[in-house]
Amino acid sequence: MPLLGYAWLIRELALPERPLAVESRLGTRMRTVHELGGVTRHEYPAQYAPEPDVVGHLEFALKHEYVDLCLLRDVFLICGAAPIEAAIRARPTGRYTRLLGFFYEFTTGQTLDPTLKIGGNYVDALAPEDCFVAPTPRRNKRWRVWDNLLGDSRYCPMVRRTQTIVDSLAMPLQEELRGLVADFPPELFQRASDYLYLKETRSTYGIEHEAMPPADRSRRFVALLRSAGEASLISLLSEPELVKRQNLIVDPRYAVQAFRDKHNYVGEQRPDYSQRLHYVCPPPQWMGSLMAGLAHSAQRSTGLPALVQATTVAFGFVFIHPFEDGNGRLHRFLIHDQLHRGGFVAANVMLPVSATMLRHMPDYDAALERYSRPLLDGWLTWEIDDEGALTITNPEQVEGYYRYPDLTGQTEYLIRTVALSIREDFAEELHFLRAYDTARATVREIVDLPDRRLDLLLRLLHQNGGRLAQGKRQQFAEIADGELERIETGFAQAFGLSA
């Protein structure tokens, strides 16, 4: 069946292949098929066929598919201004011709013929029923468009309203979290919270395959987590403040004074010393505009659901990768910052998101690769010299991909991860601590052990399913067999273990 819209444009203009959220074809009837991987395939009868040219299929894509800023930019750079200007002259009040003019100037930075006469009612740049949009749109008088994009030409993420996201945001996750907190006495919850800050620190370093950092750096990371949501957003995402936070969490030898001025990539060295790349970061000359664009986008997005804004800020940050070291840890800190800032998580609560990520590393890797993989599959070209320094050799062809990321898949991932973190990791830690306190009190009623010996006994019982291993029995020779039996029974009851 003949291709339509974006799929037609990619084929006819020989653009790099990329995953499309919607693929349209001409058929004999109207039909929609949702496939694994999130692709929606539409079939349209003959009367929907657009004019067989670039403008015709661009208008079809805007009307029947979705807005893909990166792909639009790539098409505009190939076709140039002439066909867009001709379409606008022919239909100066048309909704989709005006949107083409608006998106042309937005993505290319080039101005179309200023003498073009535009009319018609104002229209939304993005359909709010299809995408998450800026809560406060801006009036673009030239094109009579309400600019409700989540950023500007420097950096503008996109999150589509998939059914998965809509259904997930309808889950009462905040109520579940508040209910868990309310079920525990404040003093017990405070102890759990203190532990969770340490666990989150250990987990975020574990994701980087690093051991727990030295005590002073660990304390600094805990302090950083505790500061989530405090600084103003525009200050937090400024270069001086991000540099300050990078300096807190990395080995002092790798602390920096500014955003990176070299190409960076994430990869691993093969036995023959060649590199297996996982992600190639945007060139250093774009760092200033990308990070300023990210800060502006964060401001524009204020008021969106906290889980959506956490994605656009935190995943946007890690894909820009402004430092040579510390990006992943700052990325996960920014998730916490946005969840606290957006009121999703109370100020005294630490949700162990990194611990959940670490337990489900294939899912986290897949969320990162969903963005990074298309670049490496034949789109990006680069050179690596003998010292391992990388240079992107086709920056103009890939610039739109870095500036206009579609973060829909990452949003679905983060919502799913936060739900697991609340329902499993957070709930498990609270219930474990309550059971531990109950077991501790039970043992004290049987034998009043000193604190350190009591904690050791409880740890050994926990490690062996509620029983003291025979090889450890001599360590507690002062406890009679009958007492130990009662201790084991009390421990099992506290933790809900089978006898």
Image: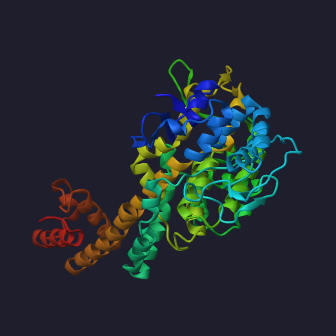
Vertical placement of 329 versus 73: above or below?
A: below
The residue sitting at the right extreme is 115
Residue visible at 76% across and 41% down in the picture: 90
State which quadrant residue 267 falls in: top right
Q: Position of residue 333 (x, y in %)?
A: 58, 57
Left or right: where does residue 361 sit relative to residue 226? left
Residue visible at 42% across and 35% down in the picture: 28
Q: Quadrant of the C terminus?
A: bottom left
Residue visible at 69% across and 43% down in the picture: 403
Vertical placement of 104 versus 411: above or below?
A: above
Residue visible at 45% across and 42% down in the picture: 40
State which quadrant residue 300 falls in: bottom right
Left or right: where does residue 373 sit relative to residue 29? right
Vertical placement of 98 versus 269: above or below?
A: below
**Figure coloring:** rainbow
Q: Position of residue 383 (x, y in %)?
A: 67, 22
Instruction: Looking at the picture, tell me which residue is in the foreground, 235 or 82.
Output: 82
Left or right: where does residue 349 sit relative to residue 15? left
Vertical placement of 66 versus 172: above or below?
A: above
Q: Position of residue 214 (x, y in %)?
A: 55, 53
